Amino acid sequence: HGNGTQEIFYDRDDVLFVSLHADHRSWGEWHPQTGLPEEKGTGDGEGYNINMPLPHGAGNNGYNYAMNRLVEPVIREFDPDMIMVSAGQDAGMMDPLARMVVTKPGFEDLGAKAQSYAQKYADGQLAIVQEGGYQPSHLAFATLGVLEGALGVGTGVDEDPFALYPE
């Protein structure tokens, strides 16, 4: 969850913050975290903060579903001037905390969706900022996937050697 980003924009209505992240409620008190659905913003920012905790193991299909059914409609309605992605690859296959099992092809899809949304709704204005990820071995593949998807280019690294589970 982009807790720092949420905090910065929590009371503003000129920035829409949408976060897809692991549902941490099952982790207990050892990992206190923000990112609950009821955290919707405050003051002018109420309704401009959207948290969508996903179940552990949501994988490529779960993220794809959330992007299509939640993220795109709210972006379309908000009508942004720019889309900024906080690319946290802690959703990756091997991440020891989130256990969301997104593979390199899943990250490619996420990057491509971000680019598509920027083209449709923000005159092509897209910024991708690297954030989290706690498994250095897979982080490189996940980041490469985001960049390949967003740029629409292939590097020849087509397989994710960490992809252990079928879709």
Image (tube, rainbow, N blue to C red):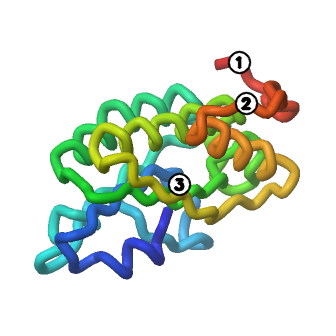
Dot 1: what SS? loop
For the residues labelled 3 and 2, the Cα–Cα distance comes to: 37 Å
Q: Which mark is residue 26?
A: 3
Q: Please, is residue 90 above or below residue 45 in the view?
A: above
The image quadrant of residue 163 is top right
Residue 45: x percent and y percent?
18, 73
Say which of 11 and 156 sits in front: 156
Name the residue rendered at 70%, 34% in the picture: 103
**Farthest-out residue, front:** 123
Which residue is denoted by mark 2 in the rendering?
A: 154
**Farthest-out residue, left:** 44
Sequence-wise, the earlier of marks 2 and 1 is 2
**Crowding at mark 3 (Cα within 10 Å: few <14, some 14-19, many 20+):** few
Q: Amino acid at mark 3?
A: Ser
Residue 154: x percent and y percent?
73, 30
Point out the frontmost of discs 3 and 2. Answer: 2
Asked if one can make out residue 57 in the rendered structure from this viewpoint, the answer is no
Sequence-wise, the earlier of marks 3 and 1 is 3
Which residue is denoted by mark 1 in the rendering?
A: 166
- The answer to whether marks 3 and 1 mark residues whose Cβ atoms lie closer than 8 Å is no
Asked if one can make out residue 4 in the rendered structure from this viewpoint, the answer is yes
Residue 131: x percent and y percent?
62, 65
Q: Which mark is residue 150?
A: none
Whether residue 32 sits left or right of residue 67 in the image: it is right
Say which of 132 and 77 sits in front: 77
For the residues labelled 2 and 1, the Cα–Cα distance comes to: 22 Å
For the residues labelled 3 and 1, the Cα–Cα distance comes to: 24 Å
Sequence-wise, the earlier of marks 3 and 2 is 3
Name the residue rendered at 36%, 40% in the picture: 119
